[in-house]
Amino acid sequence: MNAAGHILVAPPAPPRSWRNFDFKWLIIGACVALVAYLALMPLGFLLWQSFFTPQTAAKAARFTFNNYITAYSTLETLTLFFNSVTFATGTSIFAFLIGTALAWMNERTNTPLKSLFFALSIIPLIIPGILFTVAWILLASPKIGIVNLVLQSWFHTDYVFFNIYSMWGMIWVDGLHYSSMAFLVMTAAFRSMDPSLEESAMMSGASVPQIAWHITLKLTWPAIFATLLILFVRSIESFEVPALLGLPVGIHVFTSSIYQAIHHYPSEIGLASAYAVTLLLITTVGIYFQSKLSSQGSKYSTVTGKGFRPRAMDLGKWRYVTASIFVVYFALIVILPFLVLLWSSLQKFYAVPSMQALANLTFDAYQFILTYPTLISAVGNSALLAVGCATMVMLVTSVICWIVVKTKLPGRWLLDNLASLPMVFPGLVLGLAVMIFYLNVDVGVYGTMWILFIAYVTRFMPYGLRYNTTSMLQIHKELEESAEMSGASWGTTFRRIILPLLKPGLLAGWIYIVIVSIRELSTSILLYSPGTEVVSILIWELWENGQYVELSALGVMFIIALFMLVMLAQLVGRKFGVKES
């Protein structure tokens, strides 16, 4: 009753079931539903579409097995399979041999300037695959390749020393590009290995080659096999190299054949889907063996102290040879490709280096690119997709990781496998699957930026999961229990305890996904439309239009921008505690 004598009636209490509702289940349910939707829907529609004929204006699609009959029973498909496996096997072995040799020299020998080389090893990862391929076309093309022309001039012959438009050329370019990945993976393996056995062998009088062959490589066998599998999967899903180097001379692999089937009239989406299923099966087998090997890696583990550092093997005078190998490798993978793009960008029409061409240097290509109608929108689209994708992936996977690592919910292993499922999708296959799904399920997404965003989030979700899982495993359950006993809700605990402690992994994963999203081409190539182009698509269109000097100018600016982004990311990472492995 108030001062005026009126009786005050309290508002009705909310229903008991509503008061007891925990909003964490709403957030968890939304994340689980999103992961299931992103992982399963494209796969289901890809399989469904592989059993239908092309739809045209005059004829409706109908159920058929002909796509699989064509894909599995013709001699052309056998050649396709052989080319794909040959290319992937050759690339993975070549990249592994280079990367492992460099990693061993960097970690186990007294090679001069090896610390500088390790610091520079991040640079090859910055150069997008399409720009690296274009640079090697300008270097080793039979007609305009600078390397061929210089050698022909020296030896007074018309003989073509290097033909980049060949299977060996494809293996050379892709192998060089992925060798930096092999170097980083094998460097981590050598660093985590106990070097006491190597030192014992050295004190017993074994030579450096004997130690490397009989001890070092045998102890790192799980890492060797895992690296080869990673490189094989990455190679067989490669699109840029087969499209730019293989298609012009009739060397077809699965990715280039999928692209051609889509752009055929009428579009053979069913056949492309059948090819995609085959490629999907190959990558699935590779990922399965990789995960199986990881789970059995303890068989090869050795016991070591955390602060123990191995003594570098003295190579004597040979250390200058290994230093020279580092220099030659860096020239092949960074300096020569960048310089040839820079030279090309300063020409009005592409010309090989000469005194006459030197007198015709111009910035016209840069002026053309800076005034290109779609440049601003492409840069904006790339930045928006990269930042949005990285943010969404890291936040969603942080919840998924909490469920998998910190709870005992039944079926959490299935959630982990669902979130990892997109890893088996090659970029082009994922783009095809997403395209098919949203062509058949019209929710206003096809032809907009949203379809690219959905594809990017799906493609990079497994990477965010791995970064977050590593950090989540280091957070003790006692911190959450203490917060819960103090009366904090799940949302408060997650926001004020879990996320701040995840910060190093969150930031490292966010930076990585931003960089790879900006470079992404294979997923985008089937999904973009006028107005939704990204920078990698702009480079692709310039190549198809024969605008090589303009492409080179854009490539030079793109590489410099990515390099500055990586340097900024490293500064920010050091400030927030993200350390290099």
Image (cartoon, rainbow, N blue to C red):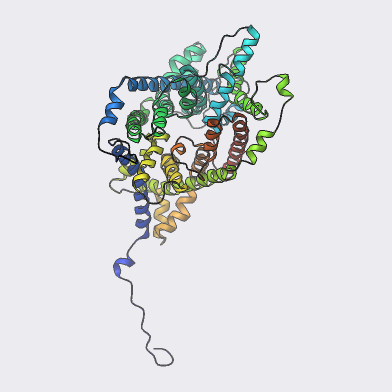
Q: Is residue 545 left or right of residue 27?
A: right
Vertical side of 210 occupied by 104: above or below: below
- Point out the residue furthest to the top here: 156
- Point out the residue furthest to the front here: 58
Q: Quadrant of residue 538?
A: top right
Q: Is residue 404 visible?
A: no
Q: Is residue 140 visible?
A: yes
Q: Quadrant of residue 490?
A: bottom left
The spot of residue 570 in percent (x, y) is 58, 39
The spot of residue 315 in percent (x, y) is 58, 14
Q: Count the numbered circles shown.
A: 0
Closer-to-camera residue (75/20): 75
Query: From the image, which quarter does the N terminus lie in?
Result: bottom left
Q: Quadrant of residue 578?
A: top right
Vertical side of 215 occupied by 449: above or below: below
The spot of residue 257 in percent (x, y) is 39, 28
Vertical side of 516 occupied by 100: above or below: above
- Point out the residue furthest to the bottom here: 4
The spot of residue 562 in percent (x, y) is 58, 37
Closer-to-camera residue (454/35): 454
Q: Is residue 488 left or right of residue 159?
A: left
Vertical side of 345 occupied by 469: above or below: below
- Point out the residue furthest to the right here: 359
Closer-to-camera residue (557/287): 557
